[in-house]
Image (cartoon, rainbow, N blue to C red):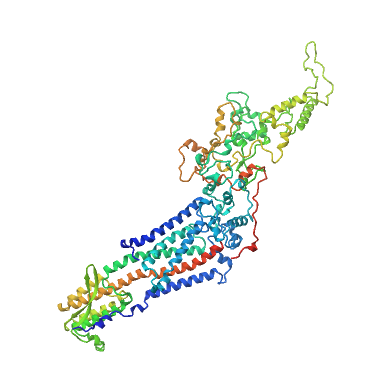
Amino acid sequence: MSLETGKQRSERIQIDYYRKRDDLSRWRFVCIAGALVASGVYAAYLFGWSGKATEQRITQFSTGPLSSVHAHFEDRCEACHLSGTPIDLQATAGPADFGPAEALTLLGIDRQSSLNHLESVCQRCHQVAAHHDERMTQDGQDIDRNCSLCHAEHRGAEKDLVAVSNAKCAICHQRLSRVCVSSPRVDESTVAFDRSGHGDFQSLKDPDPGRIRFDHAQHLRPGQVEPGQRGGTTYAALSPQWRRRYDRGQESGASASDDAPVQLNCDDCHQLSGNPEGRSTQGADLELGRYFQTISFEQHCVGCHGISPGVATSDAPLLPHAAPWDQVDLLLSATILGARARGQARLPGDNSRREPLPGIGVGAAPETVSTRLPDGVLDAARQRVQAQCQTCHLPEDYTDQAIARVGRRNADPMIPPRWLRKGLYDHAAHRSIQCEYCHAAVHQAGETTDPVDQSQVMIAGIESCVACHRPAKNPLPQSVSPEIEAMFGTTPTWGSDDCTLCHRYHGFDAAQEAPAGSVTIRPVAAVRPPDSEAAP
Amino acid sequence: MIVSRGQLKLHLGFAIPVAVLTAVCMTLYFRQSLAAGTWVGGGSWSGLLCGVIAGAIILSEMLLWPRKALRRFRLIPTKYWMAAHLWMGLASLPLAIVHCGFHLGGWLPATLLILLVLTVLSGVYGLAVQNVLPRWMLRHLPRETIYNQIQFVSDQAVRDARQLLTRACGRNVASIETAVADPELLPAGAVVVGAVRQAGKTRGKTLQTRHVAEGRFDRETLWSAFDQIEPYLREGDRVESPVRQSYGADRWFRRLREACHEESQPVIDVLQDLCDQRREFDLQRRVHRLLHTWLPVHIGLSVAVTILLGIHVWTALKFW
């Protein structure tokens, strides 16, 4: 017999149990209400209902902090952004085969308006030179005008906007004909920094542009003469001023003997300096040491190659370098007449002897010095000077016209200040590397007597660079033997292979091709007045 | 949402199209990024495409809410809604990450992405526990009852135990007044108690009627034992008790059996069974929370994501 009825048994579970609120239903309410309240409060804050200042709210919308150079625009979105018009040109730009670039046009987004706007806001502050845009296709020009493609913003204050990856350059240079209206003037495809992906330096493919006869090998030999040959330059032949410069032992008290042959080193003539005056195209070019000081006669040559007037006196003054021939003639005449007037040289017709000859006696001497040089004397003297000029110069380079050009700012230098015209090279950064590593031809030429300086640019090809400038994952090439590695000195054996290490995009090449100081500045796009832009 | 071999066809019907769509969008994104030499942002056309699809998915996921409110209209079977919810929701995360260009950005986009990640993770967690815990409970919690009836059933168990003891060995002298006032505790010939029965692999609790004997010499011992376990039977693991742990309970009941008469053993069996039941209720409570607390979190996060998404769309279009 049971005490419970069936009804009592059924009451063991409350019939309305599903209506009762348990802790889970309370938890659900807390979660949903909490989400609604929290989101609502945040939305109120974002839209300014909290009364907070705009600059405090604007950072909430931002897709990331601006780089430090643009930090003053952090709270002024409207300075760059146009309401409803994408400034991110990836939204519309890009070669047509990459995607539906025109699709957004259907939504009322004008691609050219975006391009114009982007270019105009950047050019309010940045005046940059063109990058071959006259030779670009429309796609190429769109890429070229897309500043944000290479200089992506909102990536944090530490973001270096000018650090551009190689892939950015490869957008066009991977297949250059795609963005060129005519045949590219450089390699069609450049995808990596090695011989196969980059090719050798363009400048090395051309003949030596220099117009100075100079034998590096000869100057690096002791006494600057052929091996075994007598008559080399000794330290005794140098004036005290030049001896101090070339006799390095003087500073340490181990001065070379007078009859020791002069031994020149590379740095006797090639000293680190800034960019040559009048050739400044980039801020980076002005860095001390990026280039070598321009070779000048007065600083690097006159110690041994002073221009003698050809008068047989020890104290005759040297002639100036690159002076007009009229001036040289005047100086020659004065020197010759002055020497004669002081009795340091014979007068015309003077056949007298100090010791009398039998039957002739001492001979007769003119009584007065003529103030006019006889015909032929000055010409002979000038020929002797020209013979000295020909040591280093071609005949067409010491005519009056050529000499007159020397002083002009836009004159082509006889020794190019930069040999690698398409790229930058920083000698200071490589100064602990022995010169021979990159200029092996200079030292190899010392083994022959035939100078090769005028027939080749004595700079090693790209192989000398890629030994160090290679992808970080690549090990040191096996071609770099311990002997070669020793030439690197303290320089690390790995360097970046970024394109931007040597190349500049904005106007660098154009600046090299245009006359100095005439870099073409890209025309400023139409700038919308700030009033027309929507405020946040 | 159970993902099992039997529902393979249902899930593949959604998983494959969603995977293809995601793969196509990401391929377009990676292709444009490769061409640009960097991870293009959400403003790029491919990033925008991924973002628009991810946003559309988020909004469509939220349609589950009105669908539930309007379930009387039977708008497409729930299993299809859930399968679509599952696979589209999973696809929204990679699309959103790609849309971000692999960086968090400012506070709003970062908050939005983090909330979306948490939403998807909570959903994945829910999917996992829904596929594991119910089966585990079916095997290991045979006395499982309705979650919010645990306390009600526990109180009943205490009442059953008290009635059983009264039948077995007479009233508890210490609470004679209480017993008189409670008509359920009046002497009778039988009581109803719970017991676990098994059918195949499934076990469950059934109700059984038991006849009990009259009072004996060990009445005080049994009532004293009941007084010790009663708080545990009512409150479970929220109170300290010698029978709270299974091992301790076995030892405690073994000593009780030694102290009681042979005829009291069935009564002790019932008391021990009620303690086991209470222990399973506690375990069920914990497992039930693991099984269901994620859903309010998931819903709350989804609500926040949807609101912030609306703000993000507005600001992104304005400051594109």
**Where is the C terminus of chain A found, in terms of image quarters?**
bottom right
Number of numbered discs present? Answer: 0
Depth check, front residue: B16 or A192: B16
| Residue A192: % across, % down | 50, 43
Q: Position of residue A16 (x, y in %)?
A: 33, 80
State which quarter of the image contains the N terminus of chain A.
bottom left
Where residue B193 sits, quadrant-wise, is: bottom left
* Residue A476 higher or lower than A331, as above or below: below
Q: Is residue A184 above or below residue B251?
A: above
Farthest-out residue, left: B262
Instruction: Please give the name of the residue rendered at 63% of the width and 49% of the height, measured from the top-left corner.
Output: A129
Rendered location of residue A312, percent (x, y): 73, 25
Instruction: Answer above or below: position of A85 versus A458.
Output: below
- Quarter of the image for residue B149 reads bottom left
Looking at this view, name the residue that lies furthest to the right.
A367
Residue A314 lies in what quarter of the image? Answer: top right
Q: Nearer the viewer, residue B183 or A105?
A: A105
The answer to whether residue A260 is seen in the rendering is: no
Q: Residue furthest top?
A: A359
Which residue is at the front of the view, A27 or A479?
A27
- In the image, residue A409 lies at what x, y percent? 70, 41
Viewer-nearest residue: A386 or B31: B31
Residue B117 seen in the figure: yes
Lateral position of residue A395 relative to residue B173, left or right: right
Side of B266 where B7 appears, left or right: right
